[in-house]
Amino acid sequence: MTPAFDAVIDELKRLPGLGRRSAERIALHLLVEKRSQLKSLQESLSAAARTLNACPICGNLAEEGGPCPICLDPTRDASQICIVEQISDLTAVERSAAWRGRYHVLNGKLSPMKGIGPAELNLASLAKRLQDGSISEIVLALPNDIEGQATCHYIQEEIVGTQSISLSRIGFGLPSGGGVTYADSITLRSAIESRRNYS
């Protein structure tokens, strides 16, 4: 193939979940088979890059510097927060239709070995959300691994502290070391409905 085509393959391979074969298939689809789709893809990516940002309240995707649709939705229970590691986890929980509260996206989990401490996570805004006393329940929907456990413990000790907030953690049906993003909707619904007190 040509150097230009190889450069496209190399860039596509950087995307999560794409190996060389998948990258080649996408590149051929856009550059040869369905070239008409290339322009609309470029335009939608450019528009998204200009308008998308992190929700100033929860860290979810939002547009034009404002809150995300979930934080703006008056039918959601604002007294309940489900804490997730990534936006992809939030999307997975939403697909399960088991949660009608709001969310908080940490954008990672504590990992001293990787140099990820509290300052690298979206924890300061979580502490700010708890200040007015309107939050009555927090559900920790973090991975079932050592780093997820450490993050849960930190939130319990340093963020929630002595506040009278019900703190629970999902876990039922999620395999050890498993993440929220890849769990099916039925498993996630069961995990949320079977949440247990975290202590």
Image (cartoon, rainbow, N blue to C red):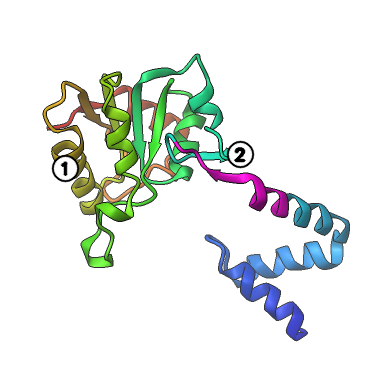
Q: Quadrant of the N terminus?
A: bottom right
Rounded to the nearest angstrom, the CA distance separating label 2 from label 1 is: 32 Å
**Quarter assignment of residue 189:** top left
Vertical comparison of 19 with 152: above or below: below
Q: Residue at x 77, y 85 (%)?
A: 2
Callout 1 secondary element: helix
Q: Is residue 123 in view?
A: yes
Region rendered in magenta: 45-56
At x 63%, y 71%, the residue is 11
Residue 159 highlighted magenta (yes or no):
no
Q: Is residue 136 above or below residue 169?
A: above
Q: Nearer the viewer, residue 73 or 17?
A: 73
Position of 189 compared to 47: left or right?
Answer: left
Which mark, residue 153? 1
Find residue 7 and name its label: none
Q: Position of residue 88 (x, y in %)?
A: 48, 44
In this rendering, the answer to whether 79 lies above or below 24 is above
